[in-house]
Image (spheres, grey):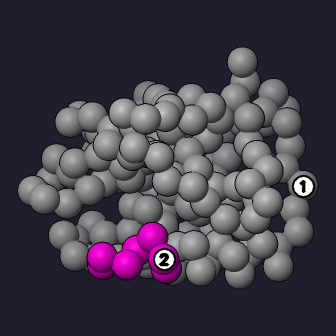
Amino acid sequence: MIQRSYPAIQTRRCTGRGSSSRIEGAVRPVDQTAYGRDDGNCLSACVASILEIPIECVPLFLGTDWQACILRWLVGQGLSASLYRSSDHVPRGYSIAAGPSKRFAGRMHACVALDGIVVHDPHFSREGLPYGIAEYLVIHGTAREVLWFSSA
């Protein structure tokens, strides 16, 4: 189990390339390293960004059972997650926003969001989610305790 204390939002500032990769607070931008239709690792890069770990430490979450896979992996880290449709809830703090991919029809792309706004696109294009956000994945403790708060 990973035991970490996360700094307050106001104490750290990380800046990446481009306006959509600037993250202030308790995350560090990590870019994806695979870009294919069936093997892209944007979700893994977003998880790595929020947890501040190297992308090599995060497995690929692919296929129709990606939700079960990510939950199993997070539980092994002493964490969990909740999934929200963007039409039902916009989470405060850091989350993973997912929406239709601009590059691959019928596929989703993931970015890091803060208070529902994309702040880091792990793809080198930094295009974000131009077709909108369909859902948010919020990483939290296993008892649903919030780990990251907004700066507001």
Numbered badge on residue 105: none
Between 65 and 7, the residue placed more toward the observer is 65
Side (left or right) of 133 relative to 79: left
Q: Amino acid at mark 1?
A: Ser
Q: Where is residue 123? Give x, y as percent.
A: 34, 52
Q: Is residue 125 above or below residue 12?
A: below
Q: Which quarter of the figure is the C terminus placed in?
A: top right
Q: Residue at x 69, y 76 (%)?
A: 75
Q: Residue at x 58, y 50 (%)?
A: 138
Quarter of the image for residue 148 reads top right
Q: Which residue is mark 2?
A: 68
User: Which region is colored magenta?
Assistant: 63-69
Task: Spot the residue most to the top.
Answer: 152
Q: Where is residue 142? Give x, y as percent.
A: 76, 64
Side (left or right) of 2 relative to 117: right
The answer to which of marks 2 and 1 sits earlier in the sequence is 1
Q: Residue at x 59, y 80 (%)?
A: 72
Q: Where is residue 10? Give x, y as percent.
A: 81, 27
Mark whose residue sits in front, 2 or 1: 2
Q: Residue at x 79, y 60 (%)?
A: 143
Side (left or right) of 60 relative to 37: right
Q: Which residue is mark 1?
A: 5
Task: Spot the residue most to the left.
Answer: 105
Callout 2: helix, strand or loop? helix
Q: Which quarter of the figure is the N terminus placed in?
A: bottom right
Q: Where is residue 124? Give x, y as percent.
A: 33, 50
Q: Amino acid at mark 2?
A: Ala
Quarter of the image for residue 126 reads top left
- Residue 78 painted magenta: no
- Residue 66 painted magenta: yes
